[in-house]
């Protein structure tokens, strides 16, 4: 799989892989480029064994792969990379969603300039579809700057608030 591609979350293994916040942190870290277990452990402040375990789960789910290897002091060093550029999912999984928001919350907490909006709107199905298409195109068409530029995270979601068959507070 080309790392410039989109990966749609569909399989139980993928949902399981995303159900742990540390795996999201690994995926975020690998967004900078290929890295070894030692580099990831150092950057994330985690034990190498923890990193290796979670990388294995992500690899088995098809979300991480070996980018290349390098011979060092009689051994082989593996560099891991994300197997996708963009992650999408049509089906919501509560555990995976909670883990994702937990990992994003950690990133937001460290950025005093982060932008976060939550707004509920009343939309017709046609308006919701237009908004969804616009947001999807905006994120999909964003161009990457050079490797020497800072990285930014984008989390976009459009969801139906509450159950569509439930009347509002006024009974309508």
Image: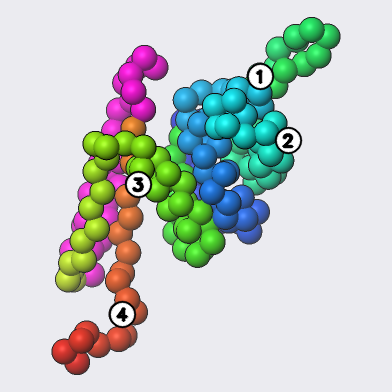
Tell me whether circle 4 and circle 3 mark residues in contact (CB < 8 Å). no
Q: For residue 49, which numbered disc appears in the image?
A: 2
Is 107 left, or right, of 81 in this rendering?
Answer: left
Q: Position of residue 126 (x, y in %)?
A: 20, 66
Which residue corresponds to the image point at 30% horizontal and 59% vertical from the top-left?
158
Which of disc 4 and disc 2 is earlier in sequence? Answer: 2
Q: Badge 2: few (under 14), some or many (20 or more) residues near its Cα, within 10 Å?
A: few
- Residue at mark 1 to residue at mark 2: CA–CA distance: 20 Å
- Foreground of the two, 116 or 77: 116
Task: Between label 1 and label 3, give the one nearer the viewer.
Answer: 3
Name the spot of residue 124 as percent of width and height, x first: 18, 71
17 left or right of 27 in image: right
Element carrying mark 4:
loop
Instruction: Tell me the CA gap for discs 1 and 4.
Output: 49 Å
Circle 1: element type: strand
Circle on res. 21? none
Picture residue at 70% right of the left edge, 31% below the top = 48
Instruction: Check residue 140 for magenta coloring.
Output: yes
Q: Is residue 158 above or below residue 139?
A: below
Q: Which residue is mark 4?
A: 164
Q: Which residue is mark 1?
A: 68
Q: Which residue is mark 3?
A: 155
Q: How many angstroms separate mark 4 from mark 3 (CA)?
A: 24 Å
Tag nearer the camera, 1 or 2: 2
Residue 3 as seen in the image, left or right of residue 66? left
Give me the C-alpha separation between circle 2 and circle 3.
Answer: 29 Å
Quadrant of the drawing holding the C terminus: bottom left
Q: Farthest residue to the right: give it.
A: 74
Q: Indicate the quadrant where residue 60 lies.
A: top right
What's drawn in magenta, residue-wise?
A: 125-151
Secondary structure under the numbered disc 3 in the rendered image = loop
């Amino acid at each position: 799989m080309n790392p410039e591609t989109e990966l749609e979350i569909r399989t139980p293994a993928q949902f399981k892989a995303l159900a742990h916040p540390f795996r999201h942190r690994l995926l975020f870290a690998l967004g900078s480029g290929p890295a070894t277990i030692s580099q990831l452990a150092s950057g994330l402040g985690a034990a190498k064994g923890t990193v290796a375990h979670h990388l294995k789960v992500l690899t088995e789910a098809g979300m991480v792969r070996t980018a290349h290897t390098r011979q060092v002091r009689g051994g082989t060093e593996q560099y891991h990379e994300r197997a996708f550029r963009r992650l999408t999912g049509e089906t919501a999984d509560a555990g995976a969603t909670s883990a994702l928001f937990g990992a994003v919350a950690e990133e937001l907490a460290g950025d005093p300039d982060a932008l976060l909006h939550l707004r509920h709107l009343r939309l017709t199905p046609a308006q919701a579809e237009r908004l969804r298409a616009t947001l999807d195109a905006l994120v999909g068409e964003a161009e990457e700057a050079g490797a020497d530029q800072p990285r930014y995270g984008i989390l976009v979601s459009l969801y139906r608030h509450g159950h569509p068959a439930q009347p509002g507070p006024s009974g309508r």
